[in-house]
Amino acid sequence: MLVLCTTLFPIGLWCQEHNYSFEIYGTINTDIGYNFNSIHPDWFDVMRPTKLPSYRNEFGPGGNMFFSVRQSKFGIKSSQWTKLGELTTRFDFDLIGFGKDAGQTTIHLINAYAQLRRVGIGQTSSAFMDPDVFPEVLDYWGPMSRVFMFNVQLRYIPIERENQRLIVALERPGAKADGGDYANSIEIQNIVPVFKFPNLTAQYRRGGPWGYVQVAAIAKSIKWKDLDTADYDLSGSAFGWGVNLGLVYKVSTALTFKTQGVIGEGIENYIADAPADVALQSQPGNIAQPIQGKALPVWGFFTFAEITWSKALRSSIGYSMETIQNTDLQSPDAFRQGRYGVINLRYSPFYLMMFAAELQYGRRDNFSDGFRSEATKIQFTVKYNFSEKFLQKEKS
């Protein structure tokens, strides 16, 4: 901390003639829970229906207890007035491992973002995403169908008023593929992804004292190149698109409804818990190209009620569902549909501290083999928020 403050001090001196604020913030989050059923061991402390068993005893018996601090978070943010207007920055991370670090307690970058007036650049929540509609749940993953992507982007905000906002962005492209029963074939192994264009995203929000409604859209180009065309060329492309509609409605000071629906094709990597964006599909009668890649259609929704029992006691209860339209060449045990439900009780003796308990439910249905798996989890969380803000006033 001393090194950090020493490093930042000269910045404060350089900004003596401007309003400048710098804030250190974060959470210490400890989760203790019990998995009554089995789940992929890399995701022991979250509820992800796509990671539930796809066949009997895939991950061994259920009945496992877990302890985790992976939701703990640390961040810094700043605000400064310049000749061109206000410059804000944000940098933070949690400890949830992804990719090759799945299952580990390690640094996971969330925001690394700077915005000057209406232009922003860096990694932050996608313009296709709406963090404000997310329900207050203890589970890190939350409703499986929610749009959840922190992406590197260049964004512009042409409209930003109290009850109205418009954002457009160019974002880092990407996609996930499912090779089905062909996944280990030499032909599929020689296919590489090609992303020549950024993803185009946009959102528009309109609100008032009652809450707000927001619509967002995405368009993405997905291409792949076959490096071995000795037998036939499996190169191809697909167009990914999606629409995301969210609503936050304040019925009263004690009750708020939050709901979101998403539909599209090839946008699974933008959804919190979804399988591949692209899968193989047969082309009967096409000798030159007997199989091709296809952007998978997906739709889902969640709806939650946020209840305030008292100043210190609150609850959330809700349900989510997600459905994939599979292709004929996907494996019979490929993910087809998932369901998710949560109910919790949160107690905050003061605004920086929370004690909570949550019951979670998940279900996975396979594509065509008739198998399904269910899971129930109970989670207890103790959370402490900390924040310290340093403000330098304009010189008189």
Image (cartoon, rainbow, N blue to C red):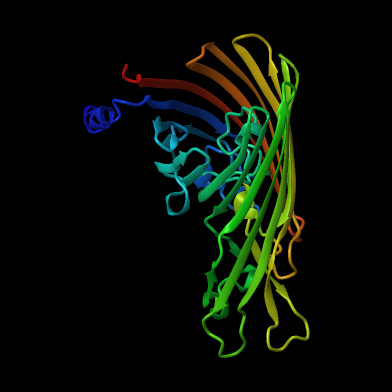
295 shown above or below 93: below
Q: Is residue 7 left or right of residue 163?
A: left
Left-right relation of 162 to 114: right
Between 328 and 161, the one nearer to me in the picture:
161
**Where in the figure is residue 246, as x and y percent of width and height?**
72, 37
Quadrant holding the C terminus: top left
Please report the residue visible at 52 percent of the width from the left and 24 percent of the height from the top: 381
Choose top left, top right, bottom left or bottom right for residue 267: bottom right
Q: Is residue 57 visible?
A: no
- The vertical placement of 326 against 233, above or below, is above
What is the quadrant of residue 141 in the picture?
top right
Image-based side of 317 in relation to 8, left or right = right
User: Residue 94: horizontal and vertical position, in percent?
Assistant: 44, 37
Number of marks drawn: 0
* Residue 151 image offset from top left, x and y in percent: 52, 49
Please state which of residues 53 and 28 is positioned toward the viewer in this rendering: 28
Residue depicted at x 45% and y 20%? 384
Question: x and y percent of residue 33 in the render?
Answer: 54, 30
Q: Quadrant of residue 181?
A: bottom right
Q: Could you tell me which residue is drawn at 52 percent across and 18 percent down? A: 354
Figure quadrant of the N terminus: top left
Residue 168 visible in the displayed image: yes
User: What's the residue at 78%, 86% (across, down)?
Assistant: 285
